[in-house]
Amino acid sequence: MDGTLDHVMLRVADLNDSLEWYETHLDYEEKDRHEGDGFTIVYLGPEDMHEDGAMLELTHNEGDDDLDVGDGWGHIAVRVPEGELEDAYQQLMDDGVEDYRDPESCGGRYAFVKDPDGHEIEIVQRDQGARWSLDHTMIRIEDADEALGFWTRKFEYEHTSRWEADSFSNYFMKPADAAPEEMSVELTYNYDGRSYDMGDAWGHLCVRVDDLEEDWDQLLTREAADYRDPESNDNMYAFTEDQDGHEIELLERDPSADSLFPF
């Protein structure tokens, strides 16, 4: 299994507003688009993103303009170079982005803004990857041992770092031998035993596979959830779920194809 995190999908109420926001404030460009029956999917990312860097997928469903962000998904994080956090945040403020959590309120280590649909976007300082490229996606989990076991056993991910606080822990997971520029998964575990609501504004994470059918069979052998198998999706992609119900797409990516979509 390849294991590279290919993209993270967010649902948006107004596609044009969202595209303008990401293209204006994060300098994203449209990589590809698919117009379906009642929905549109757009892939976005920095112009000079790494070949294994993750894309942002925005999905708009016609007539679906009342989205619930929920709290089972947390945020996406984007990168700026070390030492440029405050300047980057101030530039966003100057450009009209709403002030949400500034660097000072976050101890000078990171900051947060929100996109037009209320998706939280963390700004982190990294010396790798294109400016504004996706650094990680945070999801909230109810059992840390089960979640860590899921990603290590099912997808052969490695536990690359963690942060232990008084009331929560953060665990970062990546494929073995992943490039520094690749996106990681941040698993957030709160010690108070709370449960979470998925909502419908967050969509899924997508993991690249080498062979969809073979890797799907391997996941089932490893007792992954049989959620939406390849056959039910015309053998173009498949979906499993983690122990908390976060959806994970499996997709073969052909770099030489004319389209980023398997349609």
Image (tube, grey):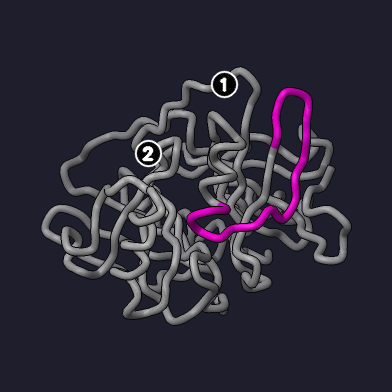
Element under disc 2: loop
Residue 195: assigned label: none
Most distant residue in the top direction: 63
Q: Which of marks 1 and 2 is in front?
A: 1
What percent of the width, then of the height, locates residue 116? Answer: 45, 38
Give the residues drawn in magenta, as a range. 23-40
Q: Which residue is denoted by mark 2 in the rendering?
A: 72
Instruction: Reply yes or no: does residue 37 show up in magenta.
Output: yes
- Dividing the image into 4 quarters, which one contains the N terminus? bottom right
Q: Which residue is drawn at 22% across and 48% down?
A: 190
- Where does residue 138 sit, x and y in percent of width and height? 40, 53
101 or 23: nearer the viewer:
23
Q: Disc 1 to disc 2, how far (Cα)?
A: 20 Å
Q: Does the magenta stretch include residue 32?
A: yes
Question: Looking at this view, is 50 or 87 the one in front?
Answer: 87
Q: Name the residue under label 1.
A: 64
Residue 162 falls in image quadrant: bottom left
Label 1 crowding class (10 Å Cα cut-off): few <14, some 14-19, many 20+? few
